[in-house]
């Protein structure tokens, strides 16, 4: 790794549209004074040298030198401080300006070249107000970077100064993108500050370019085709290598789960001991299995797995699910064994998933090959997890919430099949409506985000990223490198690629419930209907925090609701039904809001879920009045339950009619009820969350996806 000095850096950058400052190089103190006198005071004097980074911190920059004596004294002090690393002096006219920004470039080992923009000067690292984009970027992407920083208001008129020339800033960022593509030897660029003067003109006052011999690019991973993965998730026959009767062992739990839930194809149990298991023959070798095997499920110790590859080849087994652990997750010895199995399998033409995987599921085919016996219903949500435990937890949540699963895969060590292969398979799968990914790392970041962007145009991609905390500072000379933490860059590339990034497991399932059950909103305007005022206030605040707009009701809408509601209703959005028990009011009001042109989505609060409060009241009544039986109140409970179902079906019918999402928040939380209410033969489903936060966040994620689709369609 080596640095260009500041003058060399600026010469390179000037060729890519970066507005560098006019400056002169002086070989020594004497020439520095001469140049300063010709340039005109005040001047800026800097040490020049490829090894001199962070010059301000080392006292190697002097500002506002007013005459020859000050210049001479400053040059002598700089020379002493720089020592043998000094290559000369750099002189610039002293520029004024209250606004400083930073732009830069880094090359992430997994994600490739990344462009950065943000607040610069002395506040760069203190405030960390920066944004990132993967190369290549165009003018549209660069403009979005300027708007995305928290301090974007500084680009407008500021304390008597003219708006910044954003066209120049956009050209600067696009230029850095071109530089990255044309100069692979450039590993980092740091331009700090990008000074905006009182007239709005932009000047690159300081710059650093770091070059590095990148060596041989890593060998690209072999792609596993969607067709091959499709066969793994739809096997016509399965053999368990390492079948066992020991309760809780993988060799017992996996086939028990599969057989207990009705898998229709042939299932073969293999163990060298032979004998019987559950009334089924146990074959001593796969060569003894009488029929073809589409998928082998392997649970034997790691050291014995390699010996199976030749047996699979001879038997014609095309694919294997390697449950076995003890490979690269255990260290170098395990990594070597894993790579040996990988090479053997490739030569034999066998595809395997794992090793160290939690298994797979395809509820559509009654394929439940996981050690934990969660059995979610069939649906359109595909889920891949790099953590087995997290994957099982998400499956359990999905089952509780009524979220239908297209397929589940624990990707394990991803020796052969990586997260990118899964995502591209779900892209072309017609039954997949939403893709959920729990990630801790990616094998090929460029391919991953390129695929995610393509998939996101067809169906939402929702990611929960583990390891979000900063693992450590980059050992880099530039601000760009120091600020470029893995997760910050990952989040930025998610936004760029249209990926919905969530921070909690339940948020992932909520977003999936919304995407799988509701029409997409066409904007961010929200109408709120509530049974009580407090919830409406809280939900309005939450909408504001998530960039959703609670529009005021227009005159026509108020008049319409006046004809439906009691005179003491709120007369505003949120529409407060003030706790009225008339069950016809919510039906009328929510239809009026769904039809209103002033909103793109409706959130209703506390209207549903009242049957559980009624049930609790009935129980109390039977306790205090021994002469009353629960059956005496059954007609009330039955009537309320019937109304709850009527109301849910009503909201679904309104979504079909007006193509707007309607999200519910139940009055009480009840673990027996999931988030999704299915309506037979309906285009959409009812969605009911237990809190306003969950509803607003889910709607916000839907709006993010719609924003991405619009950006892409406008390109």
Image (cartoon, rainbow, N blue to C red):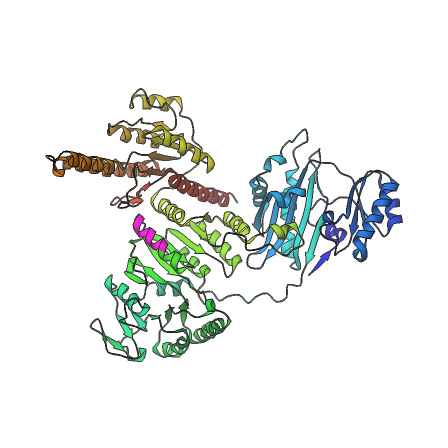
Q: Residue at x 78, y 39 (%)?
A: 94
State yes or no: residue 401 in magenta: yes
- The residue closer to the viewer here, 402 or 558, is 402
Residue 473 placement (x, y as % from top left): 60, 54
Quick check: can you spot residue 431?
no
Residue 14 placement (x, y as % from top left): 72, 48
Residue 38 placement (x, y as % from top left): 87, 41
Q: Magenta: predominant secondary structure element?
A: helix
- The residue closer to the viewer here, 170 or 322, is 322
Quick check: can you spot residue 308?
yes
Q: Residue at x 42, y 33 (%)?
A: 525
State yes or no: residue 493 in magenta: no
Residue extending furthest top? 567
Left or right of 516, for residue 707? right
Q: Residue at x 15, y 36 (%)?
A: 622
Residue 609 vertical position relative to residue 179 in the rendered view, above or below: above
Kindly indicate the quadrant of the structure image that contains residue 621. top left
- The residue closer to the viewer here, 3 or 179, is 3
Where the N terminus falls, by quadrant?
Answer: bottom right
Q: Which residues are magenta?
A: 393-402
């Amino acid at each position: 790794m080596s640095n260009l000095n500041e003058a060399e850096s600026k010469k390179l950058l000037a060729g890519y549209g970066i507005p560098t400052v006019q400056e002169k190089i002086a070989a020594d103190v004497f020439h520095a004074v001469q140049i300063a006198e010709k340039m005109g005071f005040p001047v800026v004097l800097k040490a020049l040298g490829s090894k001199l980074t962070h010059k301000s911190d080392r006292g190697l920059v002097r500002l506002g030198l007013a005459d020859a004596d000050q210049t001479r004294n400053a040059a002598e002090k700089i020379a002493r401080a720089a020592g043998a690393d000094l290559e000369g002096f750099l002189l610039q006219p002293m520029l004024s300006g209250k606004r400083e920004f930073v732009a830069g470039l880094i090359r992430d080992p997994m994600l490739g070249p990344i462009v950065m923009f943000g607040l610069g000067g002395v506040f760069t690292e203190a405030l960390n107000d920066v944004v990132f984009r993967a190369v290549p970027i165009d003018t549209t992407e660069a403009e979005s970077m300027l708007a995305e920083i928290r301090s974007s208001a500084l680009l407008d008129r500021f304390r008597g100064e003219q708006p910044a020339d954003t066209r120049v800033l956009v050209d600067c960022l696009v230029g850095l993108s071109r530089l990255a593509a044309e100069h692979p030897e450039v590993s980092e660029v740091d331009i700090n500050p990008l000074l905006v003067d009182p007239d709005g003109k932009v000047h690159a006052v300081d710059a650093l370019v770091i070059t590095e011999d990148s060596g041989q690019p890593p060998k690209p991973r072999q792609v596993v085709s969607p067709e091959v993965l499709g066969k793994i998730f739809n096997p016509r026959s399965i053999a368990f290598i390492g079948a066992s009767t020991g309760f809780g062992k993988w060799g017992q739990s996996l086939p028990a789960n599969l057989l207990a839930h009705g898998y229709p194809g042939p299932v073969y149990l293999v163990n060298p001991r032979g004998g019987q298991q559950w009334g089924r023959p146990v074959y001593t070798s796969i060569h003894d299995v009488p029929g073809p095997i589409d998928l082998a499920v392997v649970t034997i110790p790691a050291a014995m797995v390699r010996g199976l590859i030749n047996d699979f080849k001879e038997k014609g087994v095309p694919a294997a699910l390697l449950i076995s652990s003890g490979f690269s997750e255990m260290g170098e010895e395990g990594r070597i064994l894993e790579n040996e199995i990988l090479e053997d399998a490739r030569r034999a033409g066998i595809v395997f998933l794992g090793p160290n995987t939690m298994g797979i599921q395809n509820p559509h085919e009654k394929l439940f090959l996981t050690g934990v016996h969660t059995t979610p219903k069939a649906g359109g949500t595909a889920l891949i997890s790099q953590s087995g435990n997290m994957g099982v937890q998400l499956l359990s949540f999905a089952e509780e919430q009524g979220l239908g699963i297209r397929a589940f895969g624990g990707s394990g060590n991803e020796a052969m099949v990586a997260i990118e292969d899964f995502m591209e398979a779900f892209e072309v799968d017609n039954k997949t409506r939403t893709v959920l990914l729990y990630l801790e790392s990616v094998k090929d970041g460029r391919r991953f985000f390129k695929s995610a962007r393509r998939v996101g145009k067809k169906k939402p991609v929702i990611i929960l990223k583990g390891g979000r905390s900063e693992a450590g500072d980059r050992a880099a000379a530039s601000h760009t490198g120091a600020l470029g933490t893995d997760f910050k860059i990952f989040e930025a590339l998610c936004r760029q690629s249209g990926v919905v990034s969530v921070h909690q497991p339940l948020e992932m399932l909520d977003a999936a419930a919304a995407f799988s059950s509701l029409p997409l909103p066409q904007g961010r305007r929200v109408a709120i209907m509530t049974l009580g005022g407090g919830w409406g206030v809280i939900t309005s605040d939450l909408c504001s925090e998530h960039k959703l707009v609670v529009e005021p009701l227009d005159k026509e809408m108020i008049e319409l609701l006046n004809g439906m509601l009691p005179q003491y209703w709120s007369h505003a959005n949120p529409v407060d039904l003030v706790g009225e028990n008339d069950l016809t009011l919510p039906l009328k009001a929510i239809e009026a809001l769904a039809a209103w042109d002033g909103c793109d989505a409706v959130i209703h609060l506390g209207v549903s879920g009242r049957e559980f409060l009624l049930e609790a009241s009935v129980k109390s009544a039977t306790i205090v009045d021994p002469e009353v039986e629960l059956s005496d109140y059954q007609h009330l409970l039955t009537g309320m339950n019937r109304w709850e179902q009527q109301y849910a079906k009503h909201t679904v019918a309104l979504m079909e009619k007006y193509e707007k999402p309607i999200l519910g928040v139940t009055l009480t939380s009840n673990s027996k009820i999931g988030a999704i209410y299915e309506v037979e033969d309906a285009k959409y489903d009812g969605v009911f969350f237990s809190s306003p936060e969950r509803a607003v966040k889910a709607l916000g994620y839907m709006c993010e996806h719609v924003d991405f689709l619009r950006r892409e369609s406008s390109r």
